[in-house]
Amino acid sequence: MSDCIFCKIVNGEIPCYKVYEDAEVLAFLDISQTTKGHTLVIPKEHFDNILYCPEDLLGKVIRVAQKIAQAEVTTLGAQGVNIIINTNEVAGQTVMHFHVHVIPRYSDNDKLRLEFLSNKLEKLNLPSIAEDISKSIK
Ligand code: 5GP
Ligand code: ZN
C-alpha cells in the first residue's frame, strides 16, 4: 500500500474528478483550482518526478496535457494555458508523484502569478554554462 496521494487516486482509494484516463495516463481536476479547469496529468505508475519518468511514457503524459489544453481553450473559453512541471521541493513540488499542471488562463488578473525575473547576466559565464549543460545531456 502506497502512501503517495496520487497513487491512491490511481487506485481509487481517494476520489477525484476524472478528466481523462487510458492504460498509462490519468488526468483529474486539481483540488486547488487555481483557475477554473486546473487539471493534473499523471502517469499511473509512480515516478517521483520528471527526472525519473521513462521517455515513452513522458511523451504520452505530455500529449495528454496538450489534448487537455486544447479542450480548455475550445470548451472552457480559456485564452491560453500554462503547462507547469514543478520538480523537487526547491521548485515547489509538494506531491512527489510526477504530474503536469495544465492551468487555463482567462485574464492576466486571475489567481496565477508567474514571474521570470532577469538575472545579472554580466556575472554569469554564459558560454561555460551552455557548454556544461550541453556536454552532460545523455
Ligand atoms: P505541486 O506543488 O506538487 O506541483 O502540485 C501538487 C498539486 O496537487 C497542488 O496543486 C494541489 O492542489 C494538488 N493536490 C494535492 N492533494 C490533492 C488531492 O488529494 N486531490 C487533488 N485532486 N489534487 C490534490
Ligand atoms: Zn505515486
Image: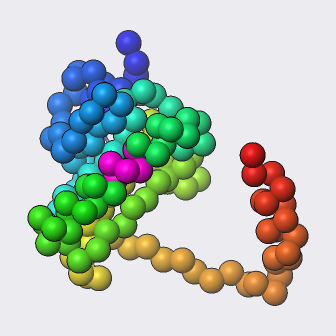
Measuring from the top left, give residue 42's x and y in whole percent.
37, 40
In percent of width and height, residue 63 lies at 37, 50
Figure quadrant, ligand 2: top left
Compared with 28, 104 (above or below) is below
Query: Does 30 sit above or below residue 131?
Result: above
**How far from the left and from the top, in percent, is residue 78?**
20, 72
Range of the magenta residues? 61-65
Q: Residue 62: within the magenta? A: yes
Residue found 36% across the figure and 31% down from its top: 24
Marks counted in the figure total: 0
In this rendering, is residue 28 above or below 105?
A: above
Q: Quadrant of residue 70?
A: bottom left
Prevailing secondary structure of the magenta residues = helix
Q: Quadrant of the N terminus?
A: top left
Q: Is residue 49 visible?
A: no
Q: Is residue 118 above or below residue 73?
A: below
Q: Is residue 40 rendered to the left or right of residue 17?
A: right
Q: Position of residue 131 (x, y in %)?
A: 84, 65
Q: Residue at x 48, y 77 (%)?
A: 115
Q: Residue furthest top?
A: 1
- Can the viewer see residue 75 in this picture? yes
Quick check: 65 left or right of 91? left
The coloring applied to the image is rainbow
Q: Name the residue at 55% across, 35% down.
A: 54
Q: Is residue 27 magenta?
A: no
